[in-house]
Image (spheres, helix red, strand yellow):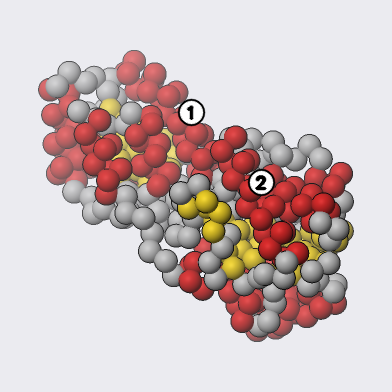
Amino acid sequence: MKRIGVLTSGGDAPGMNACIRACVRTAHYLDMEIFGIERGYDGLIAGDIKQLGPRDVSDMVQRGGTLLRTARSKDFQTEEGFARAVAMMGNFKLEGLIVIGGNGSLAGAIDLKKAGVKVIGLPGTIDNDLPFTDFTIGFDTAVNTALWAISNVRDTSNAHERVTIIDVMGRECGDIAIYAAITGGAEIVLVPEIPIDLDDVCRNLIESRKRGKTSSIIIKAEGVDIDSNVLDAEITKRTGLDVKVVVLGYIQRGGSPTAADRLLASILGSKAACLLHDDISGVAVGQVGGKVVWPELEEAMSMKMASVNELDNLAKMLAI
Ligand code: F6P
């Protein structure tokens, strides 16, 4: 291929800029023209498309957010919008497209593939909820941000001998919660993959006090089916302990990407451009066991997620 496009879609994730940079510079290295599409599929529909040179991505490797901006496009889900998006590929003579995003964005990439667009999907989301890759771009930074918050909360939690519930993102995936819990030394972690038992949570809190702990951190993933304030009220009622809630929210989506995220973004972005250059498309590019893999998009998205049980057990064991 000689002329390709790149877009970011869905929730932004730290490392998206490093990934765009890798796509752009690899494309130039391989003598391809590359175009940036603004605001995800919305920009493809509207034709908000501009050529990118190597200097357009200068000073970007360390930045959070996405220089192309992003959106969760409603229009793309309509027949008319989708048809316009496909037509725009032709209008701009784009032979291939790189989509950097999460679940919804890569589902959109599968639809484009079915419509004949030569597309490659890259995993860009903090949630780590894509089964074809060990880690998604942005996950490591989000965990580190959660970790920074846990450390701060631990100081004040200790000082007041409190229970603090830290509510983290992740949609239906508990990975941010469980990685942050293990590395941050949380007493309890609640993830959507494992049913929660409130009696058990309260018993653990009381028993940990008996073992000499004077404060407790609970990490709760957003996908867990109980609101953090309800959890706060229940724990307070059942244990009499002093409980506070901290919702991390969008703080986890921003910030300068970690080295791990920049490296992953660079490897996957560059590989996607190389594959399109060799006319290979219709795949998702990920990394499994340190090796870059590129299964067919449909197969990639229907793989089974890795179990969190082992890490959950580790978190419990280390919280004693
Ligand atoms: O997918 C990333 C994510 O931050 C999820 O963790 C969260 O559920 C969702 O996006 C929030 O989406 P929005 O930016 O549309 O509020």
Q: CA distance from mark 2 to mark 1?
A: 25 Å
Amino acid type at circle 1 is: Trp
- Element marked by disc 2: helix
Amino acid type at circle 2 is: Ser
The label shown at residue 266 is 2
Would residue 213 be found to the left or right of residue 249 on screen? left
| Quadrant into which the C terminus falls | top left
Comparing labels 2 and 1, the label whose residue is closer to the camera: 2
- Viewer can see residue 16: no
**Residue 206 placement (x, y as % from top left):** 15, 30
**Looking at the image, is 62 positioned above or below residue 156?**
below
The residue shown at (79%, 69%) is: 1
**Looking at the image, is 303 positioned above or below residue 27?**
below
Which residue is tagged 1? 148
The residue shown at (38%, 29%) is: 184
The label shown at residue 118 is none
- Element marked by disc 1: helix
